[in-house]
Image (cartoon, coloured by chain):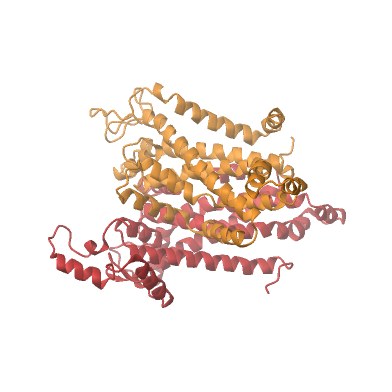
Amino acid sequence: MPGDPARLLIPRGRAIDPSIMERMREFYGLDKPIPIQLLAYIVQTFQLNLGYSFYYKAPVGQVIAAWLPNTLVLVGISEAVAIVLGFSVGAIAGWKRGKRFDIISTTFGLTTWSMPTFWLGIVLIMVFSVRLGLFPVGGVRTLELQYANIFQQLADLAAHLILPVITLTLVSFAEYLLIMRNSLVDVMTEDFVLTARAKGLTEQRVLRDHVIPNALLPSVTTIAIALGFIVGGALQTEIIFSYPGIGMLTFQAIEFRDYALLQGLFFIDALLVIIANFAADIIYTYIDPRVKLQ
Amino acid sequence: MRNVSGFWKVYSANRKGVIGLGLVLFFVGVAVFAGLAPFDPSKVDATRTWLPPNRVNWLGTDWFGHDLFSQMIHGTRVSLFVGVFATLISAIIGTMIGLLSGYYTRLIGEFLERVVDFFLVIPYLPLMIVLVAVFEATEIPIPILWIVIFAIGVTGWSGTARIIRSQVLTVKERQFVDRARTIGASDMRIMIRHIMPNVFPLVFANVVLTVAGAVLAEVTLDFLGLGDITTISWGMMLHFALSNNAMYRGAWWWLIPPGLAIILLVMGFTLIGYSVEEISNPRLREKKF
């Protein structure tokens, strides 16, 4: 592997006694063979010990715990908005297939889907922060500001969050919109929709009681798969807005060759994605009575 | 090949497909004739820096004095090149793993399925970044552009594998597979000569969509500073624009055109992919107006 972590612990450009370097490698277990290092890593991971960050000079768990909440707030709000918005707009678009609403909303969705996430962030910063001066250009709080009360603190946080949230919402919203639309179009060709109409149900009831519940099934499955994509989107959003979350931390860990931190971050990413998949499975059993948990 | 004219007849009736094909062909044309750009894209004119669009430099100039219109034209080549070759890698890996895991459903298939699951849910951007960072730091002399292609290719095949597998599972139950086996065809031969041709048309849509993802991935890696700084690409233009504070100095002509070009190219591939999907799944076919 490129880059010697032991070197990172030494101030840049200072000559160092080789014996101290040796001691350092020994201390961090870097002198051991790779299989032994791997075994130690696996054992420690099960003990919930993610190791020690070479760059931050603190336990990896602590570093991640300090940065994770910001990401959860950003991703949580954006995804909630994107899912609700994407599913409802997608359902209407599928229902009005080929009409003006469908064409406009799918074209809009395709456009935001085709955008590089960071570029959307750039455009929003240029328009709303630099030109109009409405929102701060980045970060998560105004550094020099002493908050008088909790409301002022929340307002400051909201002002910093609004552009990153819009960015992440717009790029992930299209995926939900298109899936919901296509799955709705698919379901509408089913015989039970014809039956529902033949029974004399109003169009609204056909949509609400027969089409949407069935169209939701494949759509919910995509939420879990979309999460891998969202981690990448969050990373770009955090970097362009200098937002201190784990996406930004990942980028720094790579830049500083902080392997322990990087491993920890991958572990947390994987864990979050697995938890989300699990949650999607549980939601699935609620919306599809045919699927039962054993 | 007798189906080509029939396919074209259905395809050309699909408005989205025609628009998508038009967009992609336009960019392919620009890439082929990039030599006709008004200026040498890497030539620096120190007397003409930070110029907004004007009569000489149609899209203005950057901080170094490059002509941005010429850079845009030449950048098309890199985006298409990376998009196509990374997709080729993904398609080969995805097809192989999809075929194997669909054909051998027992131990090998189960194992490969778990590998596909892993790659399907793993956040691919951090993985790609690590791959590029690791290979760029090794001593092996591979051009950075190929490292980027490789990293995008080996992280983007899981969707293809999944679709191929589900197709193989149905195709291998058909009679002609049994017939081939009865006359003594080997597993390898059945997979390549009998199953693959039947699976491939349905995979085409997925492969075209993979190109769109690969183009976006290349731009993102460039933006993060992991691209080759000596190539001229849309992503590198954005990277240099950002590192020279174009965002705060209001140099919109340096930031907006590369983004728009990326959107149009990605949209072109996406529209082609969707319309091929619609054609192979008649339920989704466009209604006639």
The x and y percentages for residue B158 are 55, 52
**Residue A9 position by quadrant:** bottom left
Residue B259 or residue A52, whichever sits in front: A52
In the picture as drawn, the residue positioned furthest to the front comes out as B184
The x and y percentages for residue B79 are 44, 37
The x and y percentages for residue B11 are 67, 33
In the picture as drawn, the residue positioned furthest to the right comes out as A199
Looking at the image, how many numbered discs can be counted on the residues?
0
Q: Is residue A8 above or below residue A135?
A: below
**Where's the N terminus of chain B, which quadrant?**
top right
In the picture as drawn, the residue positioned furthest to the bottom comes out as A47
Chain the render paints red? A
Which residue does the image show at 48% across and 61% down from the upper left?
Answer: A75
Which residue does the image show at 59% across and 41% down from the upper left?
Answer: A107
Which residue does the image show at 54% across and 39% down from the upper left?
Answer: B267
Which residue does the image show at 43% across and 32% down from the upper left?
Answer: B77
The x and y percentages for residue A289 are 73, 68
In the image, taking residue B9 as reference, residue A168 lies left or right, namely left
Q: Is residue B49 above or below residue A135?
A: above
**Where's the C terminus of chain B, which quadrant?**
top right
Chain the render paints orange? B
Residue A96 or residue B27, whichever sits in front: B27
Q: Is residue B157 visible?
A: yes
In the image, taking residue A290 as reference, residue A220 lies left or right, namely left
**Residue B6 position by quadrant:** top right
Q: Is residue B157 above or below residue B114?
A: above
Residue B103 or residue B260, whichever sits in front: B103
Residue A199 or residue B85, whichever sits in front: B85
Q: Is residue A88 visible?
A: no
In the image, taking residue B105 as reference, residue A112 lies left or right, namely left
